[in-house]
């Protein structure tokens, strides 16, 4: 991912990468390379749960630190450790760590303490306070309101949200999960704080309706259980391990086998990119040869995916709340029509098929429009 991110940063004249403790071995070199291309790096401390293995990578250059737990370790020591890592990588942003929210009162106390102390260690960096939410029946509307009450008390510039995907699903078809996330983002934005949502994918483009500032994309999804056990083999993550082709107009990802089928079914025109989306990473798929016989590989598929999502992020938020809502509804309806045309020819995205998610997004967007449309419309230009 570091090689791919640096290459894309050079192509885009800048990008932001979020590093974990497990990716710090070559972090200084990588950070220097990112800055050379106008990019920057941030550090997610991954203190979602107690886990010593997570920090083995950092001890080679910070041997005096043995911090692993927000609750048991001294918070000053934890923040000092995070500060030293940020100094090492030259970060402009200080991500304040957090445990998973399983006990609100305990979580609120720890986060309030961290917020009150962070300026001492941030060295004038922008601060983002982590909210790590498990997929749990306890994360309901009442809990989201409590979290927002906490956010309003924090002396931080913004929030970094990670929201656990249930059942290790890539797309989440749980209406409440997405509604809670959109409500949380919208509430934080109305408090004039920056919001970054980590471990995202194309499903969360709809957070433009809550005027989310950024979604962080990569080759894995947030699984709290796996992140509790950082240091396990990478194969244990929810990873993008298959070469796929991301089709922005349907928000779906198709394997090479289904691209071959599209070629036989004379459906490649439907899968072609719009002119503004074209990139050198996937051009080879549409030059007449059978996709499986081309050089298109995993790295190409990931770079193509990230490049398309960057463009979609840039155009997702419109001038008004109303325009953004109408755009989401139009894009979902258009995506459904295209997916149905492809499915008639037997071309499906399997577990990356967006057809089961488009209705969820339309429902959540409509609910958010009805419940928060007035206040979001009035605040739109100032948030």
Image (tube, rainbow, N blue to C red):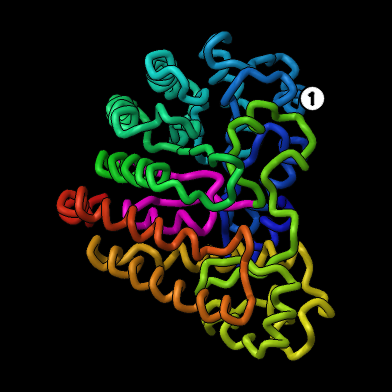
- Image point 47% across, 51% down: which residue? 173
| Residue 276 visible in image | yes
The count of marks equals 1
In the image, residue 271 above or below residue 50: below
Magenta region: which residues?
193-218
Q: Which residue is mark 1?
A: 60
Q: Residues within 10 Å of mark 1 (few under 14, many from 20)?
A: few
In the image, residue 227 above or below residue 79: below
| Residue 132 visible in image | no
- Image point 58% across, 54% down: which residue? 39
* Residue 223 locus on image (x, y percent): 60, 37
> Which residue is nearer to you in this view: 43 or 250?
250
* Residue 181 locus on image (x, y percent): 39, 43
Answer with the quarter of the image where residue 229 lies: top right
Query: Is residue 310 left or right of 382 when viewed as pictured?
Result: right
> Which residue is nearer to you in this view: 241 or 175?
175
């Amino acid at each position: 991912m570091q090689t791919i991110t640096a290459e894309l940063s050079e192509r885009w004249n800048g990008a932001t990468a979020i590093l974990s403790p497990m990716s710090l071995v070559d972090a200084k070199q990588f950070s220097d390379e990112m800055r050379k291309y106008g990019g920057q790096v941030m550090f997610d401390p991954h203190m979602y749960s107690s886990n010593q293995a997570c920090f083995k990578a950092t001890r080679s250059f910070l041997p005096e630190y043995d911090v692993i737990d927000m609750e048991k370790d001294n918070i000053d020591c934890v923040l000092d450790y995070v500060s030293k890592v940020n100094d090492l990588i030259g970060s402009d942003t200080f991500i304040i760590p957090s445990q998973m929210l399983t006990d609100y009162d305990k979580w609120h106390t720890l986060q309030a303490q961290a917020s009150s102390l962070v300026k001492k260690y941030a060295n004038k960096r922008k601060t983002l306070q982590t909210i790590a939410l498990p997929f749990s029946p306890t994360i309901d509307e009442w809990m989201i309101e409590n979290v927002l009450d906490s956010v309003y008390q924090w002396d931080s510039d913004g929030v970094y949200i990670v929201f656990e995907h249930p059942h290790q699903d890539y797309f989440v078809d749980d209406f409440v999960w997405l509604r809670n996330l959109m409500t949380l983002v919208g509430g934080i934005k109305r408090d004039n704080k920056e919001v970054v949502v980590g471990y995202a994918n194309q499903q969360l483009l709809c957070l433009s309706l809550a005027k989310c500032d950024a979604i962080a994309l990569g080759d894995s999804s947030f699984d709290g259980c796996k992140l509790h056990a950082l240091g396990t083999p990478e194969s244990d993550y929810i990873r993008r391990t298959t070469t796929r082709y991301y089709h922005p107009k349907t928000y779906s990802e198709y394997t090479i086998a289904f691209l071959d089928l599209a070629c036989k079914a004379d459906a490649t025109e439907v899968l072609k990119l719009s002119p503004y989306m074209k990139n050198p990473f996937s051009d080879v798929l549409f030059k007449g040869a059978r996709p499986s016989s081309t050089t298109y590989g995993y790295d190409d598929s990931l770079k193509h995916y990230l490049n398309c999502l960057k463009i979609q992020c840039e155009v997702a938020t419109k001038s008004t709340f109303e325009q953004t809502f109408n755009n989401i509804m139009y894009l979902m309806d258009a995506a459904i029509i295209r997916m149905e045309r492809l499915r008639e020819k037997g071309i499906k995205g399997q577990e990356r098929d967006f057809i089961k998610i488009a209705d969820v997004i339309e429902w959540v967007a409509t609910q958010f429009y009805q419940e928060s449309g007035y206040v979001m419309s009035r605040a739109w230009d100032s948030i």
